Image: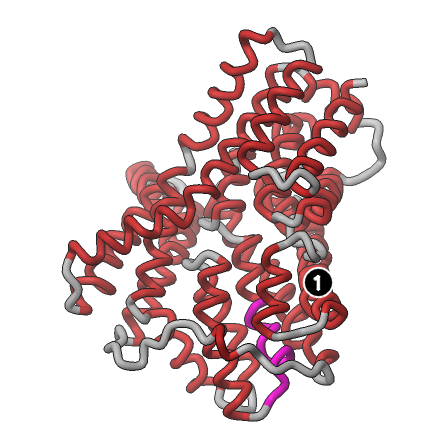
Amino acid sequence: MTLLIVILCIVLLVLLITVGKTNAFIAFLITSITAGCFMGIPLDQISKSIQKGMGDMLGSLVIIIALGAMLGKLVAESGAAQQIASVMMKIFGVKYIQWGLVCTGFIIGIPLFYNVGFVLMIPLIFSVVYQYKLPAVYIGLPMLASLSVAHGFLPPHPSPAALVAQFHADMGKTLLYGIAIAIPAIIIAGPLFARTLKNIKSEPNLSFSGKNLQNKPLPSSFISFFTSLLPVFLLTGTTLATTLFSTHDNLIRLCHFIGDPSMVMLIAVIVATFTLGVNQHQSIKDTMTIYSDSVKDVAMVLLIIAGAGALKQIFMDSGVSNEIAGTLKNIAIHPLILGWLISAFIRVCLGSATVAGLTTAGIMAPLMGELHVDPNLMVLAIGVGSLMFSHVNDPGFWMFKEYFNLSMKDTLRSWSMMESIVAVTGLMGVLIIDFIFY
């Protein structure tokens, strides 16, 4: 009966968002209250559970996500992203132009939110298409695959960062594992899969040409790469240092302090303020205005994450997590595959990777003590599952369709299949790492 209530609550959430067109945050609150009532939580305790869940979830994430938005906005506004793209194009040349776009998308995708990276890179993709007379989907899809993978796999993006917090995983290890899984996923779903799409006819919509920063002096190549990748350097560096110098207590404490995701993002934003702000003859006031605007872009993301935290707390306070754990023990399926399946199912139903990942985490996180799997790999399994088969209920689907001016059939054949390949390849990578190291 308990498992049935959980399933019905997920169905309610899906229906509210899809059929009822309800805002995802409000849908989470309604679902949480409904779940609390049916699971026997006293009425006067439901609101307390919701508040606790929201507070616990946001407490560890507001700093990371807000600072991540600030860094990404400054990277875009300063022209650093455009500089990175220009350098990568020069390195790879016309012959390997696809691989240059893939690498550009991955590097830019680390600090930038997907939608920002998408809009920012569209002018580059279209300029390459028209300059070299190449098929638009064949050229553009690999770059967008790398942007999507960075968004779904790698902290400090909102969904992976939230999953790390829910599963008490190590963000540095998750990032390292994520990069190891991301590389083959991008290659297979990007350049290799795109070879099958050369015959798709596309006349990109030039009205979506995006910002032109040609008249603005760009940051140097070194500054652009260094600032954009600084969070990666700090997270991976401190993670490796704690492993290599495990007997040096003071150094370990320093690494834990610097390697804390909140500190990593704060350091990165402070550095960016000078390298991409002051160094570009931009006043501190103007830089702070960019930061203020960036937070508006993630306000709803934070609310959705908070709503997911509320639902998770309801599941925990009702005791349903223990009952689900007992049920799952009897299911002959690997826990990582189970997490992936739940996440993929919700993604297909809802269209939102963030909502799919957070909803799945609310179900799986309380069970981790019983499942005996590495939390870093569970974060990635759910993350890759949340990218499964993007279709008509996903805004990303329509962005791709309209920007590339494609038919519905060709959008499903290209975009939806690319996302599905990413999800399946990512799961295989997670299982391989689990087999080798655990």
Q: Position of residue 381 (x, y in %)?
A: 65, 47
Residue 139 highlighted magenta (yes or no): yes
Q: Is residue 381 visible?
A: yes
From the viewer's perspective, is residue 138 above or below residue 31?
below
The answer to whether residue 196 is left or right of residue 140 is right
Which residue corresponds to the image point at 36% horizontal and 63% vertical from the top-left?
228
Q: Is residue 355 above or below residue 9?
A: below
Mark 1, residue position: 416
Is any atom of residue 435 visible in this view? no
Q: Nearer the viewer, residue 200 or 376?
A: 200
Report which quarter residue 325 is drawn in. top right
Res 59 quadrant in image:
top left
Q: Is residue 398 magenta-colored?
A: no
Q: Nearer the viewer, residue 51 or 34?
A: 34
Question: Quadrant of the rendered structure where residue 408 is?
Answer: bottom right
Answer above or below: position of 73 versus 325: below
Q: Residue at x 79, y 27 (%)?
A: 329
Which amino acid type corresponds to the residue marked 1 in the rendered image? Answer: Ser
Crowd tier of the residue under label 1, counting other residues whose Cα lies within 10 Å: few below 14, some 14–19, many 20 or above: some
Look at the image and give the residue range highlighted in magenta: 134-144
Q: Secondary structure at mark 1?
A: helix
Q: Against 224, is 420 above or below?
A: above
Quadrant containing the C terminus is: top right
Please state the horizontal and vertical placement of residue 428, each as a whole percent of the image: 72, 55
